[in-house]
Image (spheres, rainbow, N blue to C red):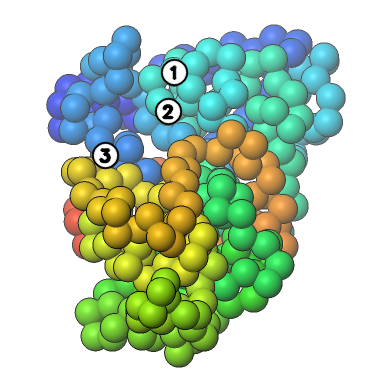
């Protein structure tokens, strides 16, 4: 079978390897789709992940069709469509330095258990949408960390894949009104298509004043200027201006949740925010959300499909990797298999 391997800094190769053997406790999955993550491009740039430096197999957003079920495995049958938890693999994290990668013809889920290593999904959902399960779990964890629920007024900064998934997740949790902020017109158009109640182009509009128009306003501390009545702010952009804007806008005891990766330090004036008693929360990964988000995808896959910008066949996987690594060229690339 074929598998994509990082062999040196800025170099990938497609290797022919033996199909992995499977035992009675294992499930064999033929890959049907695998998303490309920003971390994949990082692994390529640095030449892989120790201890598999020079032999890192890529792909940690996999989905596929079950082709073999071990006699000791329950809850799945041959022909089922499944999403996979790359963090739960017995032979190391799939596509993150483990023995296997999702950009391969086959995966073996060792010691496979339904609800731990995999979850069965309806067959009518397109493969390129099913493959969003892992990155959307990241977004869903951000929603959970924010505490958003029924009646919440929220704003999401950044309309990339995770930001759009966050907007859908907020609505799934019952948020009353969700605003998405970005500077790229087609991303804002996508935000509307996935269910955002309003969008703000921060290159053309005053975000704080627009939030007041959309969510109402509350008095400031001791006669200071009023602030938007927004309850929850979520950063899926990872730029310092977002933090500065959010902290300047936040109401008393509002919540700011950071989902994005910030590549450089961000200054915060704690004296300035002391009186607002704001709650700053960090969000990383998906401790419990990998299959919780699956319910949202099943219910709203027609919305999630707008997140995928490019579908590339496995025969052209190197083009897909190059596309995903080019800033501004695309949003979400998913590789599909015949």
Q: CA distance from mark 3 to mark 2?
A: 12 Å
Q: Nearer the viewer, residue 192 or 261?
A: 261
The residue located at (64%, 36%) in the rendering is 288
Mark 2 lies on a secondary structure that is loop
Give me the disc on residue 98.
Answer: 1
- Residue at horizontal 74 percent and vertical 13 percent from the top: 25
Q: Residues within 10 Å of mark 1 (few under 14, many from 20)?
A: many
Residue furthest left as drawn: 9
Do labels 1 and 2 touch, CB within 8 Å? yes
- Image position of 101 with respect to 18: above or below: below
User: Is 200 displayed left or right of 297 in the figure?
Assistant: left
Q: Give me the residue at 75% from left, 11% from top.
A: 24
Residue at which label 2 appears: 95
The earlier-in-sequence mark between 3 and 2 is 3
- The local crowd at label 2, few if under 14, some if 14 to 19, many if 20 or more residues have their Cα within 10 Å, is many
In the rendered image, the residue lying farthest to the bottom is: 213
Q: CA distance from mark 1 to mark 2?
A: 6 Å
Residue 57, placed above or below residue 161 = above
Q: Position of residue 81 (x, y in %)?
A: 69, 43
Q: Element under label 1?
A: loop
Rendering quarter of residue 125: bottom right
State whether residue 158 is above or below residue 86.
Answer: below
The dot on residue 41 is 3
Left of 246 or right of it: where is 135?
A: right
Marked residue nearer the N-terminal end (3 or 1): 3
């Amino acid at each position: 079978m074929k598998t994509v391997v990082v062999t040196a800094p800025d170099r990938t190769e497609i290797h022919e390897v033996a199909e992995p053997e499977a035992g009675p406790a294992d499930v064999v999955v033929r890959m049907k789709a695998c998303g490309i993550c920003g971390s994949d491009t990082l692994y390529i740039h640095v030449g892989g992940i120790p201890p598999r430096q020079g032999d890192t197999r890529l792909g940690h957003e996999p989905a596929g069709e079950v082709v073999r079920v071990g006699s000791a495995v329950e809850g799945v049958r041959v022909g089922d469509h499944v999403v996979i938890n790359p963090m739960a693999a017995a032979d190391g994290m799939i596509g993150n330095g483990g023995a296997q990668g999702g950009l391969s013809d086959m995966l073996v889920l060792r010691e496979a258990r339904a609800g731990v290593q995999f979850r069965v999904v309806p067959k009518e959902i397109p493969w390129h949408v099913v493959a969003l399960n892992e990155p959307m779990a990241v977004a869903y964890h951000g929603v959970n960390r924010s505490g958003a629920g029924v009646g919440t007024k929220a704003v999401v900064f950044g309309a990339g894949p995770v930001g759009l998934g966050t907007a859908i997740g907020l609505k799934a949790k019952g948020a009353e009104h969700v605003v998405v902020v970005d500077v790229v017109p087609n991303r804002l158009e996508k935000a509307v298509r996935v269910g955002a109640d309003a969008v703000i182009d921060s290159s053309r509009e005053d975000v704080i004043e627009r939030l007041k128009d959309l969510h109402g306003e509350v008095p400031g501390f001791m006669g200071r200027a009023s602030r938007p009545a927004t309850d929850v702010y979520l950063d899926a952009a990872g730029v310092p201006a977002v933090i500065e804007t959010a902290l300047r806008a936040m109401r008393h005891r509002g919540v700011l949740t950071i989902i994005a990766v910030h590549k450089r330090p961000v200054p915060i004036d704690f004296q300035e925010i002391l009186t607002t008693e704001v709650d700053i929360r960090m969000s990383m990964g998906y401790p419990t959300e990998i299959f919780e988000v699956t319910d949202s995808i099943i219910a709203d896959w027609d919305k999630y499909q707008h997140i995928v910008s490019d579908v590339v066949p496995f025969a052209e996987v190197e083009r897909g990797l190059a596309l995903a690594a080019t800033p501004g060229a695309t949003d979400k690339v998913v590789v599909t298999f015949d």
